[in-house]
């Protein structure tokens, strides 16, 4: 907004004070009825004046806050020359915080989370202005149901916490042991059913004694201890007033992964990568990594499970995958499982056989080398003599991800062979022609047809011709 001048001598000064931002006008005023002091940016009035309006727009009266309907009044007071009120700026909400714990320990409760309006101030008097609520609530359920204080006990009477029916003079004896070592377990907490009230603790011999538990044979006891799995046990009835139980509880076992399975695919196919882990408790939370980078669970859609499905694979999906699991017993990271992606129309197997020399049972003459006696021969071998899985597009197009374990039906093996004839002495003074199979090309073929050529023992040679 521009300044009008050192003093208002006529209506033009008032008009210029308004026009820049508001497009409003007032009629002329008396000389010296209004004075402006720009040094401290305050306006001072000698007396109240009545000013006729020449606009049909309703505006707030200068310095007084009254609507202008034909006239407006200027009061005797000092105010800032800027007439607009600072209403703040559009702020930016922070991310929502974490949900609080459920407000109830049993039954239904409420969780809440908060966020902050964080945009910086544009003026000392401004406050950040964000639209919406800073607190969000949602209903929640506690792990346990609230006890029913209106129920009627079949035997005994309901205790003051409404958690159990108690019987005066009744007793329950118990012993708790480690499932693995069979040693007694101390400091085991004893509860009745799903109650949160501790009835007792086991001692160093694993024994506990609980009084007041009705010996009707229908109660269930819950046993809990750090680093052990909770266990529910129903005590056996001994007589009219006594029950007993002997229980073994499972210690936590850190999770560990079974050997991961590598996968092969062509571009455009689908795949499921799997992590198999065992432990106590059984692992049910997983994080997936590709080349040591965490994959977002929602973006990749695996929902923290042990299966990662990838559709319409591209070359960028190839790499080393691993997963991490976490349980109350600890956490563990799997070994690497590799996803190999080949462009369509390419061969998974190395088509050129590896060199593989084998010893002959006896020196033989090689006609290709001028009947030179040789003691070894290169028979060629595929995949260095190991079983290497491969896939054939026509057999499995994998439009769906498949299962955790792909069927092992195709392997890299010989797809073309030839024979090499050698002259070998089997009978003193005679030479017999022997044909040896030689692998000349490798490819993807049925595993049950795959063979790795080896030289048979001399007793199994089948001479084609005996030369006299």
Image (tube, rainbow, N blue to C red):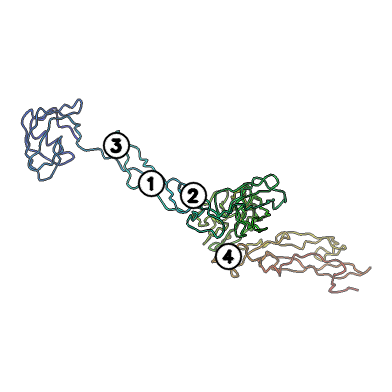
Nearest to N terminus: mark 3 or mark 2: 2
Give the CA separation, mark 3 to mark 2: 43 Å
Give the left or right position of residue 448, taking residue 21 as reference.
right
Per the image, the residue denoted by label 3 is 126
Sequence-wise, the earlier of marks 2 and 4 is 2
Image quarter of residue 272: bottom right
| Tag of residue 402 | 4
Q: Quadrant of the C terminus?
A: bottom right
Q: Which mark is first along the chain, 3 or 1?
A: 3
The residue at which mark 2 appears reads as 105
Given this view, does label 3 or label 2 mark the residue nearer the observer? 2
Above or below residue 71? Residue 35 is: above
Residue 324 is at least partly visible in this image: no
Q: Nearer the viewer, mark 4 or mark 1?
A: 1
Residue for point 58% across, 65% down = 402
Q: Is residue 165 visible?
A: yes
- Viewer-nearest of labels 2 and 4? 2
Label 2: element kind: loop
Look at the numbered discs 4 and 3 and tell me whether their residues touch, using CB distance below 8 Å. Answer: no
Helix, strand or loop for disc 3: loop
**Left or right placement of residue 63 versus residue 107 in this view:** left
Separation (CA) of disc 4 from disc 1:
45 Å
How far, Cα to Cα, is label 1 from label 3?
Answer: 22 Å
- Residue 398 image position (x, y, % from top left): 56, 66
């Amino acid at each position: 907004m521009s300044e009008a001048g050192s003093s208002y001598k006529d209506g033009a000064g008032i008009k210029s004070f308004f026009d820049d931002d508001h497009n409003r006008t007032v009629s002329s005023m008396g000389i010296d009825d209004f004075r402006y002091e720009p040094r401290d940016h305050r306006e001072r009035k000698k007396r109240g004046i009545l000013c006729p309006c020449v606009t049909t727009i309703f505006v707030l009266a200068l310095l007084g806050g009254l609507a202008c309907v034909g006239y407006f009044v200027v009061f005797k007071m000092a105010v800032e020359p800027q007439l607009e009120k600072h209403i703040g700026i559009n702020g930016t909400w922070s991310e929502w915080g974490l949900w609080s714990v459920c407000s109830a320990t049993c039954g239904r409760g409420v969780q809440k989370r908060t966020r902050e309006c964080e945009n910086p101030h544009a003026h000392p008097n401004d406050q950040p202005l964000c639209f919406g609520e800073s607190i969000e609530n949602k209903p929640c359920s506690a792990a346990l149901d609230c006890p029913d204080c209106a129920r009627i006990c079949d035997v005994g009477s309901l205790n003051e916490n409404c958690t159990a029916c108690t019987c005066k003079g009744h007793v329950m004896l118990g012993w708790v042991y480690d499932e693995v070592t069979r040693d007694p377990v101390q400091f085991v907490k004893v509860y009745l059913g799903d109650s949160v009230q501790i009835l007792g603790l086991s001692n160093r011999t694993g024994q506990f004694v609980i009084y007041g538990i009705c010996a009707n044979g229908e109660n269930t006891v819950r046993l809990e201890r750090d680093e052990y799995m909770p266990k529910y046990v129903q005590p056996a009835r001994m007589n009219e007033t006594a029950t007993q139980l002997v229980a073994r509880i499972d210690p936590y076992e850190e999770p560990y992964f079974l050997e991961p399975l590598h996968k092969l695919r062509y571009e455009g196919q689908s795949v499921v990568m799997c992590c198999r882990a065992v432990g106590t408790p059984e692992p049910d939370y997983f994080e997936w990594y590709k080349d040591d980078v965490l994959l977002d669970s929602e973006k990749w859609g695996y929902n923290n499970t042990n299966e990662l499905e990838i559709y319409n694979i591209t070359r960028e999906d190839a790499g080393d995958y691993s997963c991490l699991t976490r349980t109350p017993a600890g956490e563990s990271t799997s070994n690497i499982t590799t996803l190999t992606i080949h462009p369509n129309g390419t061969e998974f197997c190395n088509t050129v056989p590896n060199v593989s020399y084998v010893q002959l049972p006896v020196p033989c003459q090689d006609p290709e080398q001028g009947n030179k006696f040789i003691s070894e021969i290169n028979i060629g071998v595929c995949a260095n003599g190991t079983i290497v899985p491969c896939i054939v597009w026509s057999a499995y197009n994998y439009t769906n991800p498949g299962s955790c374990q792909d069927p092992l039906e195709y392997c890299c093996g010989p797809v073309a062979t030839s024979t090499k004839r050698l002259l070998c002495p089997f009978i003193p003074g005679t030479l017999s022609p022997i044909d040896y199979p030689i692998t000349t090309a490798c490819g993807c073929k049925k595993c049950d047809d795959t063979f790795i050529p080896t030289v048979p023992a001399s007793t199994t040679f089948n001479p084609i011709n005996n030369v006299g």
